[in-house]
Image (cartoon, helix red, strand yellow):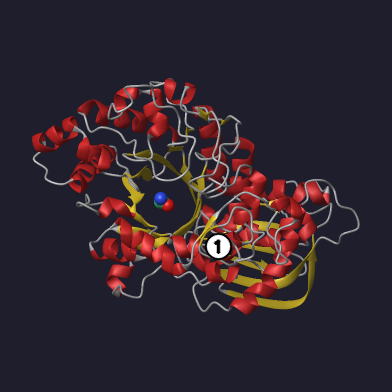
Amino acid sequence: MLLPRPTSLLIGEGDFEVTRATRITAPAELSSAASWLQGALRPATGYPLETGPGGSIVLEWNPQLAPEGYTVDVSLTEVRVAGGGPAGVFYGCQSLVQLLPPQIYRRGRVLGVPWTVPVLQIEDAPRFAWRGAMLDVARHFMPKHDVLRFIDLMAMHRLNTLHLHLTDDQGWRVEIQRYPRLTEVGSWRRESQLGAASYSRGDSRPHGGFYTQDDLREIVAYATERSINVVPEIESPGHTQAAIAAYPELGLGREDTEPLGVWTRWGIDDNVINLEESTVEFFTNVLDEVLEIFPSPYIGVGGDECPKTGWRIDERTQQRKAELGLTTEDELQSWFIRRLDDHLSRRGRRLFGWDEILEGGLADGATVASWRGMAGAVAAAKAGHDVVSCPDNQVYLDYRQSDRSDEPIPVGTVLTIADVYRFEPVPAELTPEEATHVLGGQANIWTEHMDSPRTVDYFAFPRLCALAEALWLDGERDYDEFADRLDQHLARLDAFGVEYRRSSGPQPWQQRPGVTGRPVTPQQRTAYFDSLS
Ligand code: ACM
């Protein structure tokens, strides 16, 4: 019935009916949840659902519950939603909406549907505090409207962390007032590589877009009303070509013939920033503006896939390494990340970065996103760092959904709904004490090969539904039971308007005939990661 599945659900006899006369009652502190619920129920029912005393849908606190925990009690005459905190009450409301017929997710009035909720009792609380999705809005920009829609879909699945990958080699998507060229120059590229092969040609089509600071404040406010924290990520020291294109003084100065543009290829880019004091200052200034927009305790700085070749052959970087008393390039990266960490820590925030930030030593207090499998999660938790598990071979939603040849631009290993459902964020190698460092997990939606929100729908759903349950449910997971519930849940996604992948495979318009991907086997994947270290 519900997705994610609640801790316990007891069904009784009969139904509660939402009618034109139904009102919502909530204390002032829960007015945000009450107005969310009103907004969720009004369009399809066409009922006013006024808020005020004496209503038959009651929202309330229950201090005995965990902050994200909730109960829903439905009788023939009343619905009571109680939460341990605002998030709990909000999740209770989300579950209540799911208990109505799926047409409730339509945005216009639906006639002839009885708006009933079965009499029942739900008790529920999540297993993990970090239940996330990362959206890569750098490779392909996602318009603000679609980010807000994605937030609604996350909230429907009780996900609570949106990690926005805002900058990369192929685009800089956040307005920084101090450095206007970051978006003037860095927010668009001439064309994009069409496919995943080294020989894939360009599509001769400019791509771009960025969020103003006001857009991002709106996204944060919208997410906050839905109990979602937005974690911004500003990549460095690798994945920085768009920034270098805008401000060449950040680079290694290898572009003496012609200036570097925003990158039009996919993959790992050798053009990385230099390690001058002025570059540290540039990135800390950028972060200062980011901190003004995002209240998140966690601030992403990237740290992944920074090729060290450029630093190795650059005379000035070698001189800098000596000046700093460092001996390896890994230590140089570590030095840079520590500088960002110092800056963030002094401002009361915590650095969040990909598992490469462990190499060369990591500052206390940093949180590690383990993406190259679970090795980073094990190493980080054992070293006392908090961890967000997002292993590529379990939760990278850009990886192909089957081994069919008609999957659009297939990359990575096969990652089915069942594979995602079985995702276990806590590595078996950890002691119970070390395991407390695993905050949870997130799915990563890299968009090199997703050039529109429609394609993001195809790759994200329904696998994100499976992820949400893997991170929520504290107890045994039974895939067959989940699959039955997912079938019913798809009617909600249909009503909402999600172009998910059907079990029958991609629709003709979801395919990309003739565009080459880069599918790999699990053995090839392991060999690739081994070759990097
Ligand atoms: C990553 O996938 N490069 C974090």
Picture quadrant of residue 329: top left
Residue 211 at x, y percent in the picture: 53, 31
Q: Amino acid at mark 1?
A: Ala
Label 1, residues with CA under 10 Å away: few <14, some 14-19, many ≥20: many
**Horizontal relation, residue 282 to residue 482: left or right:** left
In depth, the one of 503 and 260 nearer the eye is: 260
Q: With respect to residue 267, does 127 lie above or below?
A: below
The residue lying at 32 percent from left, 36 percent from top is 272
In depth, the one of 118 and 489 nearer the eye is: 489
**Horizontal relation, residue 7 to residue 130: left or right:** right
Q: Quadrant of the N terminus?
A: bottom right
Picture quadrant of residue 282: top left
Residue projecting furthest to the front = 199
Residue 173 at x, y percent in the picture: 49, 33
The residue singled out by tag 1 in the image is 468
Q: Helix, strand, or loop for circle 1?
A: helix
